[in-house]
Image: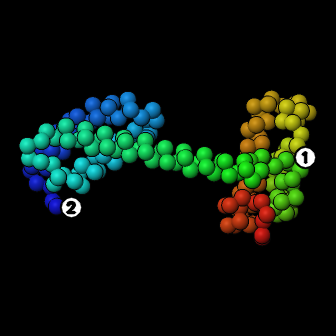
């Protein structure tokens, strides 16, 4: 990219002066606010990279709106292609019968054996929650009632228990835990 001269600085000032209008234009066409912001930023970068392509006689704002329109169309095309790929994958999974979530009884034998070894090393109250809810399948409402705590309090405790176990597993097993502990090799 060549060094920005006074001419390019004028172009940039014109674009930045219209930034709010550009943002509104993109947001009206893309429902996702974060995606709209990304498209705007990418378009500004594209304008900087291709500033030499701006004809001397063309209006800077009109030129940039054309860049925005192309970026929005590209976004829709990309999303449509992703949707087609996802649909095709889903159809393959359904055809192969792999679209069903396995039952807890099927998953239990594949859970990392390290989990059982590390469970006694975390706080006993956390270990009890994990054992009862995650391993034995008790309902959280029944456990909350048994422990005489509110369901919200139980949810917080269960979250902390899972975090503690995750930290213990990561320390013990390392990389294996980053990809999930199903069919663990450690």
Per the image, the residue denoted by label 2 is: 1
SS at badge 2: loop
The Cα atoms of the two marked residues, 1 and 2, are separated by: 62 Å
Residue farthest toward the front in the current orientation of the protein: 95
Camera-side residue of 173 and 74 = 74
**Mark 1 crowd level (few <14, some 14–19, many ≥20, 10 Å Cα):** few
- Return the x and y of residue 76 as percentages of the image width and height: 43, 41
Is 150 displayed left or right of 15 in the figure?
right
Q: Quadrant of residue 111?
A: bottom right
Residue at point 77% right, 46% down? 100
Question: In the picture, which quadrant includes the N terminus?
Answer: bottom left
Say which mark, if any, is on residue 136.
1
- Return the x and y of residue 168 as percentages of the image width and height: 75, 59
- Return the x and y of residue 128 as percentages of the image width and height: 88, 47
Residue farthest toward the bottom in the current orientation of the protein: 186
Does residue 97 sit above or below 140 in this rendering? below
SS at badge 1: loop
Say which mark, if any, is on residue 94.
none
Q: Earlier in the sequence, mark 1 or mark 2?
A: 2
Residue at point 60% right, 46% down? 87
Q: Quadrant of residue 144?
A: top right
Residue at point 40% right, 38% down? 36
Camera-side residue of 135 and 36 = 36
* Residue 115 in sight here: no
Mark closer to the observer (1, 2): 2
Does residue 101 sit above or below 172 in this rendering? above
Does residue 36 sit above or below 113 in this rendering? above
* Residue 66 in sight here: yes
Camera-side residue of 117 and 13 = 13
């Amino acid at each position: 990219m060549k060094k920005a001269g006074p001419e390019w600085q004028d172009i940039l000032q014109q674009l930045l002066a219209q930034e709010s209008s550009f943002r509104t234009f993109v947001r009206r066409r893309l429902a996702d606010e974060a995606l709209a912001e990304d498209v705007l930023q990418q378009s500004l970068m594209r304008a900087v990279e291709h500033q030499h392509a701006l004809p001397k006689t063309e209006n800077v704002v009109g030129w940039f709106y054309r860049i925005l329109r192309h970026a929005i169309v590209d976004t829709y095309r990309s999303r449509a292609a992703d949707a087609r790929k996802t649909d095709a994958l889903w159809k393959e999974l359904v055809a192969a019968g792999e679209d069903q979530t396995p039952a807890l009884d099927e998953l239990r034998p594949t859970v990392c054996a390290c989990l059982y070894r590390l469970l006694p090393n975390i706080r006993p109250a956390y270990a009890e929650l994990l054992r009862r809810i995650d391993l034995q399948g008790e309902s959280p409402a029944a456990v909350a009632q048994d422990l005489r705590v509110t369901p919200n309090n139980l949810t917080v405790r269960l979250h902390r228990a899972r975090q503690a176990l995750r930290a213990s597993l990561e320390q013990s097993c390392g990389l294996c835990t980053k990809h999930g502990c199903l069919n663990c090799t450690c």
